[in-house]
Amino acid sequence: MADPFTLGVASGEPLPDGVMLWTRLAVDPLSADPARPGGMAARAVEVSWQLAEDEHFTRGLRQGVTEAQPAWAHSVHVRVAGLKPGTDYYYRFRASGAQSPVGRTRTADDPASTRPVRFAVANCQRYEHGFYTAYRHLAAERPDVVFHVGDYIYESRQAANVVRPLGTLPGETDTLAEYRLRYARYKSDPDLRAAHAAAPWVPTWDDHEVANNYRGTGDGTAAFLRRRAAAYQAYFENQPIRVRPRGGGLQMYRRRTYGAVADFLVLDVRQHRDAGTMLGAAQEEWLISRLVTGRVRWRVLVQPLFFARRFVPGPAPNLRTDSWDGHQEQRARILAAGAPGLVVLSGDVHNAWAGELKADFLDPGSATVGVEFVASAISSRPPATDGPAVLAANPHLKFFDGHRGYLSGTAGSNELRVAFRAIDHVDRPGAPVTTVAEFRTGGDGLTSENAPSK
Ligand code: FE
Ligand code: CA
């Protein structure tokens, strides 16, 4: 029988005592038959899993059997509990006589732990725009956890600047079958599969997992709600997440805590958007209560969109309304919460940035209340951006870089450091990685290390 593990393996949602394991069976991942996603017949398939403390599956072996259901595109989401905190584990699956690749995962630290947390941040991986070489380098770092901050797929199809074509896939995704196919195409990149197999992921979505710049329930039509529900289901089927979609929605905002070091507050900037706010009232209330409680050193917002004010000189509009500059009142309430050790990790703009968060962005002399690190794209093409002009117009922004890449960070009990990893081409595989800048913060401002800043 053909290999059913063509989409790879993944793990995610690390807790001190558990983790999710994921795979999705697909013997023919790009099969165009909507009745047989991944080329799989419409019946359940038995899948067994193993997890152990070593790659030879001898120490602390745990195993179980589950079923991959056709209603969920033969995806498998296994919740493993009862594990040791801050520990590496290895896992694999078996189905239809075939063995999956081995993945490495890691539980979150014990609540009392002060051990530094090594994290990576990735986002924006339009398939047509280039190879996922950045993921190869990210995988080699084997971080404790990988945060993906959106645009895992793009719903549209590019005609220009195509490095590798999508092939026979539809122009714009609308149905469940079409979204499933998009994920299958994206996961055909071996470096993406390697990054999933190297570390547990905690993903959140931005707009392109559904539709460009959508907010909330879109235009409110049944057609949009059906499309969004299909997109959310396909997202669940293709990510190692804990929660299933229900009633057309999917609970995405959540907290992942690493010891006494960091509370990673993962936000959903799309599903609950309404006329006035980015997050909706319930998510804002949850976020602000988490920002002011808890005894961790760092409160880290993990979310897609540029958080600091970013005034782009030149013709209007100078502020991007789809981003936090379009939701200034809610942003001000978050910044005014007085969260100690506030850090924002973001993406979306396809360039790398670092900056300070100000009590009043229009007053450079006002208090610095946090820092922001913006991850560049894995592959998506950057827009034309005059970095120096934007830096000059926004004194709180300290760094710009136009390469594609990802963030590699360490949150410790004294300081938090972030390195900007960059690659100089995505039009062919094999680009080496360089560190274009490194910053640290002790909870006040931003300090640049071994790299020029403004
Ligand atoms: Fe993007
Ligand atoms: Ca986006």
Image: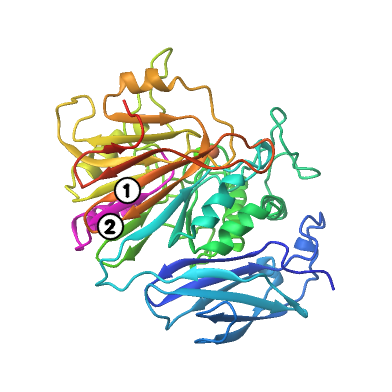
Q: Residue at x 38, y 51 (%)?
A: 409
Q: What stretch of residues is rendered in magenta?
A: 281-305
- Looking at the picture, tell me which residue is in the foreground, 82 or 229: 82
- Looking at the picture, tell me which residue is in the foreground, 178 or 48: 48
Question: Where does residue 107 sit, x and y in percent of width and height?
Answer: 42, 71
What kind of residue is marked 1? Arg
Using residue 297 as the reference point, say whether residue 51 is left or right of it: right
Give the quadrant of residue 314.
top left
**Residue at the spot of label 2:** 412
- Looking at the picture, tell me which residue is in the foreground, 72 or 151: 151
Q: What number is the disc on residue 417?
A: 1
Task: Check if mark 2's residue and mark 1's residue have beta carbons within 8 Å.
Answer: yes
Q: Is mark 1 within 8 Å of ligand 1?
A: no
Q: Residues within 10 Å of mark 1 (few under 14, many from 20)?
A: some
> How far is mark 2 from mark 1, CA to CA?
8 Å
Q: What number is the disc on residue 168?
A: none
Question: Where does residue 292 sit, x and y in percent of width and height?
Answer: 19, 55
Q: Is mark 2 within 8 Å of ligand 1?
A: no
What kind of residue is marked 2? Gly
Q: Is residue 346 in view from this perspective?
A: no
Using residue 412 as the reference point, say whether residue 402 is left or right of it: right
Residue 294 shown in magenta: yes
Residue positioned most to the front = 450
Classify the position of the C terminus by image quarter.
top left
Give the quadrant of residue 299.
bottom left
Residue positioned most to the top = 315
Q: Residue at x 57, y 57 (%)?
A: 195
Q: Residue at x 39, y 44 (%)?
A: 419
Question: Where does residue 257 sit, x and y in percent of width and height?
Answer: 32, 64
- Looking at the picture, tell me which residue is in the foreground, 7 or 142: 142
